[in-house]
Amino acid sequence: MTGLFLVIFGYAVGERIGELFLSRRNRAVMRSRGFAQREPLRSLALMAGMHALWLASSLAEATLAPVELPIWVAIAAAVLFAAAQALRFWTLRTLGSHWNVSVMTGAKGASTFVSNGPYRYIRHPNYLVVILEIVSLPLIGGAVVTATLFSVLNAIVLFSRIKIEEQHLRAVPGYWDTMQSKPRFIPGLG
């Protein structure tokens, strides 16, 4: 296990914990503005559990059974992870108090969605961040099995979550007219 992996792993754990506090604060602000949670709690618990297991698996595999990868793979994964963080900060800044870990929408008929910042280019930049993190962090530590397994699990979880989220967002006036032509994750790919 490399020092680079440990530093980035520590950052990822701290970042996840910080996001939970930020999310809690933002959910309270949104509730005070008439927003409500729109996803089943089991969906939220599934995502939280998957992220916790991904972190634990990354550390365990990097410690106990890392694959000896060429150094350029670890460097490329670290660059990908850093790029994901830049996108994360841009997304969080753009959403402001609208960002949280829950799917929330305003009262029926309220126009409450964001279409600036990274949302000018894709519908789900925060989920792109998660996709990039889930593959890159484990690879930095040689945890190839974790990167592969949790990328598949994340795809399954995101498929369900995005379906729920977009179902509720389509009820927001103007959302689908503004966002339907944008790809979900990669600019230029519809």
Image: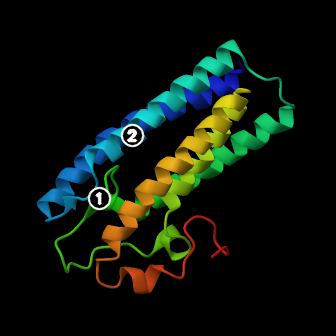
Q: According to the image, label 2 marks what residue?
A: 46
- Give the structural element (helix, strand or loop) at label 1: helix
Q: Which mark is residue 150?
A: none
One can see residue 89 in this view: no
x 72%, y 31%: residue: 144
Q: How many numbered circles are shown?
A: 2
Disc 2 residue type (three-letter): Leu
Image color mode: rainbow
- Quarter residue 94 falls in: bottom left
Crowd band around label 2 with a 10 angstrom C-alpha radius: few (<14), some (14–19), many (20+): few
x 60%, y 44%: residue: 152
As drawn, is 167 to the left or to the right of 145?
left
Marks 2,1: beta carbons within 8 A: no
- Give the structural element (helix, strand or loop) at label 2: helix
x 36%, y 61%: residue: 164
As drawn, is 182 to the left or to the right of 68?
left
Q: According to the image, label 1 marks what residue?
A: 97
x 28%, y 54%: residue: 39
> Which quarter shows the C terminus?
bottom right
Crowd band around label 1 with a 10 angstrom C-alpha radius: few (<14), some (14–19), many (20+): some
Relative to 178, does residue 39 appear above or below in the rendering? Answer: above
Of 78 and 183, nearer the camera is 183
Disc 1 residue type (three-letter): Ser
Relative to 67, does residue 48 appear above or below in the rendering? Answer: below
As drawn, is 144 to the left or to the right of 112?
right
Place of residue 54 in the rendered image (x, y in percent of width and height, measured from the top left): 53, 31
Place of residue 149 in the rendered image (x, y in percent of width and height, measured from the top left): 63, 36
Place of residue 100 in the rendered image (x, y in percent of width and height, measured from the top left): 33, 52
Of 161 and 79, nearer the camera is 161
One can see residue 6 in this view: yes
